[in-house]
Image: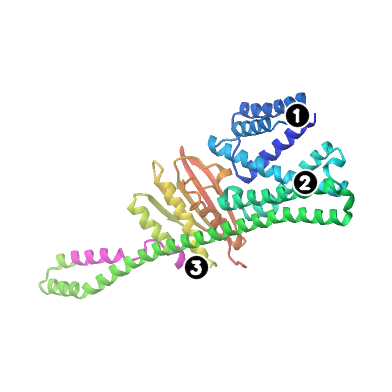
Amino acid sequence: MIYIVDNILNYLIYLFIIYFGFRINPRKNKLFAGASIAIVLSAGTLSAYYDVNSPIVYILWSVFSIILFFEDSLVHLIILSASIMYFTGIIDTFSVMLIQVVMIGRGIAGANIAWWMEPAYFLSFFIYLLVYWRILRKHEVYLHDIGLKYKLALLIQGSIFQMFYNFVFVSFNENHTMYGWDAYAVFFISITGAIYSVFLTLSLAVKNVLSDRQNRELQSFMYMQKQQYDYQLQQSVAVRRFKHDLVNHMGVLRELLNEKKTKEAKEYIDTIWNIQSEFDLKIHTGDSFLDIIVNYYSYLAEKEKVEFTVSGRLTEKIQLEMFDITTLAGNILQNAFEAALKANVPKIHVELIEHAKEIFIVVLNSTDEAVNDKKLFVTSKKDKISHGFGLKNIAATVKKYHGECYMESVSENGEMLFKISIAIPREVKV
């Protein structure tokens, strides 16, 4: 029975780490999950029948159960399951030693340790849970985000500690009578330190990921700003050219009027009027910073034949810093523009609504498929490392100003649309 319980506890630990640490989804077909569980129970029964925990059986059931349970490439799942088996084995060893030192105070040969295995698994699981809550989930960084060098460092670091403690524990077992409680206290502290060092390494890896994210966010913001600056520069150059030729235009008009060619003069004035109207901002939102961003994406939409409409107008400027307006509106419209390009009928609609205490910015864009609400913050682009921050940056900016953000897929007249609604208080306190 002990082998079956061991297998089930190990199995649950593997599922926890892979699902919550590496964010790999289970298969939708329940038959695969059933087969995965059956393999675990069969392996435990086999080990119980022969009264031996064969490493080959242990490895085979672990790999097969993971491959059947999760959706991912075969090679990745095999490597992942092997690494997790190795790492969890290290942590389990530390847990067993901690329990032995605390409860017994002597080596392996001094007592039957079979019943210690279950508490060791629970202690190991507590360590993984602590890593998840205090490091991974807290920073929204998961094991699949961490660089390979840090993953290898954790495995190598654990290996060194395990070999060291195995050697020391054998020495304690053979010479336990010559050691006092102070030696076991030191041993207990050193094992705790080993586990803590794993936390430190993982924390360093997470900080590195967060730093890279900040750099990419800054680069993305600078790129967005450059695009808007280039657009404004083009407009400015066109205005200067027009002003440069204005004297010549006035000369032509003067000659036409002198020759009493009123009809020709009127047509020429209309031509000049149409030219200068192109330099003006076509959309006025009521906020000068927002005007630049909205008009830029209106310009892009016109080039790509995307229908772009704006309704509503603000009576006062939004109480957000320029950086945050660019982050918020720029990311919303950039995502909307990219999604609309893939739709059969590309269109974007921006709606500005003022209430007594809040300002609402609602953006709807056509899309080629419904968006899974559970994956709103997961990029659909192949380069997941460089992308996927847009929606997170939007949510972070809204949170900074104590606003609210809602995202959903809606269907209008049989057409699939993505809708994002932002509510920002009129009086914000950062």
- At a point 46% along the width and 37% down the height, the residue shown is 414
- At a point 63% along the width and 55% down the height, the residue shown is 139
Q: What is the secondary structure assignment of the residue under circle 2?
A: helix
Q: Mark 3, mark 2: which one is toward the viewer? A: 2
Identify the residue position indicated by label 3 in the image.
Answer: 322
Q: Mark 1, mark 2: which one is toward the viewer? A: 1
Is 285 part of what is drawn in magenta? yes
Is 248 part of what is drawn in magenta? no
Q: Mark 3, mark 1: which one is toward the viewer? A: 1
Q: Of marks 1 and 2, which one's residue comes earlier in the chain?
A: 1
- Observer able to see residue 121: yes
Taking 98 as reference, is 261 above or below it? below
Location of the N terminus (image quadrant): top right
Q: Of marks 3 and 1, which one's residue comes earlier in the chain?
A: 1
Q: What is the secondary structure assignment of the residue under circle 1?
A: loop
User: Dot 2, crowdedness within 10 Å: few (<14), some or many (≥20)?
Assistant: many
Q: In the picture provided, is 267 more to the left or to the right than 353? A: left
User: Dot 3, crowdedness within 10 Å: few (<14), some or many (≥20)?
Assistant: few
Range of magenta residues: 266-291
Q: Residue 9, percent across and down?
A: 74, 36
Identify the residue position indicated by label 1 in the image.
Answer: 52
Cα gap from disc 3 to disc 1, whole angstroms: 67 Å
Amino acid carrying mark 3 in the image: Met
Q: What is the secondary structure assignment of the residue under circle 3?
A: helix
Q: In the picture provided, is 315 more to the left or to the right than 175? A: left
